[in-house]
Image (tube, rainbow, N blue to C red):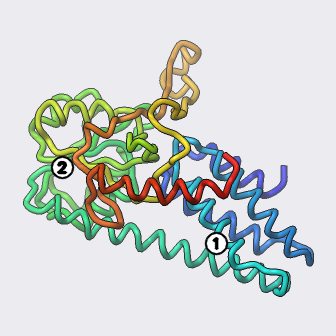
Amino acid sequence: MDWIDKKIDALAKDRSHGAAQLATSAVKTLMDVCKRSRGKDVGQLVTSVRKTALSLAKVRPSMAPICNWSLVFCHRFEEKINDRISFPEAQQRGILLGEELLKKQQRIVELQVEASRAILKNRDSVLTLSYSSTVESILKYSLPPNCRVVIAESRPLMEGRRLFENLKHIFADLRMITDAQMGLAIPSTDLVLVGADTILGDLGVVNKTGTYLSALVSHSHGRDFFVAADTYKINVAMDSSNCVLESKSGNEVWPQHEKQCDNVYFDLTPAKLLSGFVTEEGVLDVAGMKTHVQHWKELYRNFDF
């Protein structure tokens, strides 16, 4: 296994980071392809970038940003390369492109934080589940310190505890609950805000298991349910009828009965249960997101899926 395979394998096995953070790792891997390639053949460098981008695009089917940022890097890199430039210049263009995309990723989060203020203004309580770096930033910078924040822990690895630890010095009224308590907690909460790993072509949401249940409870009790997801999380290669939901070892649930334990990591929340999406383009409803679906359809045509 060469170094590229090792990086892709590490990304495939990563259970500590969300889709946005893993997309950053994907961009850095493609930058490394440009940095570490040896030779004089510019065409071979382009081939290596494309091959790596396609491998990254397919490694975590439930996490669309890894795919999209990898394809964007590849597409933009190929646009920048021609027969007249030298191998070192091609490498440098790839490195600069990666730096540009990493800055853009950070700017997208800042824009989501700004957009979220429109829906969080005057809210007294918010509930979320699992861990999302985007949701963390929104809660840190868009909520007043006196707001009540409830976090469902998200079994079996309890990623919600990470969010709790990161927020405990900011919010005086911070509560941790088990996933099973969401049915009790949501009716007394102003708003539910979750992240997303993928937005499907029909705008269904793939996110950590428990998201669908929280959306059903929110809908039943008339509570707003928003998804913090930028437009790079749209995956037009899948919709609700054919999406792939990752499953992991039952050992994480109950080691003594590993083979009898189901451990599906993600679930699917239909678009009809959503109040809207907090994106870099503002707070969008389902109709507003459809224009961005078309954009990704055009890009995907350049690749073999």
Between 176 and 138, the residue placed more toward the observer is 138
Position in image of residue 256 (x %, y %)? 54, 16
Q: Residues within 10 Å of mark 1 (few under 14, many from 20)?
A: few
Q: Is residue 80 above or below residue 118?
A: below
Figure quadrant of the C terminus: top right
Position in image of residue 215 (x %, y %)? 26, 36
Between 142 and 199, the residue placed more toward the observer is 199
On residue 108, the disc is none
Q: Quadrant of residue 200?
A: top left
- Which is in the foreground here, disc 2 or disc 1? 1
Q: Is residue 74 above or below residue 191?
A: below
Position in image of residue 128 (x %, y %)? 27, 45
Give the amino acid at mark 2: Val
**Residue found 84% across the figure and 87% down from its top:** 84
Give the amino acid at mark 1: Arg
Helix, strand or loop at mark 1: helix
Q: Quadrant of residue 7?
A: bottom right
**Residue found 55% across the figure and 44% down from its top:** 237
**Residue found 28% across the figure and 57% down from its top:** 284
Position in image of residue 118 (x %, y %)? 17, 64
Helix, strand or loop at mark 2: strand
Image label count: 2
Q: Which residue is mark 2?
A: 126
User: Is there CB contact under 8 Å for labels 2 and 1?
Assistant: no
Q: Quadrant of residue 43?
A: bottom right
Q: Is residue 55 above or below residue 142?
A: above
Left or right: 236 as drawn, with respect to 207: right
Q: Which residue is mark 1?
A: 76
Q: Earlier in the sequence, mark 2 or mark 1?
A: 1
Q: Residues within 10 Å of mark 2 (few under 14, many from 20)?
A: many
User: Distance of mark 2 from mark 1, alpha carbons?
Assistant: 39 Å
**Residue found 35% across the figure and 71% down from its top:** 110
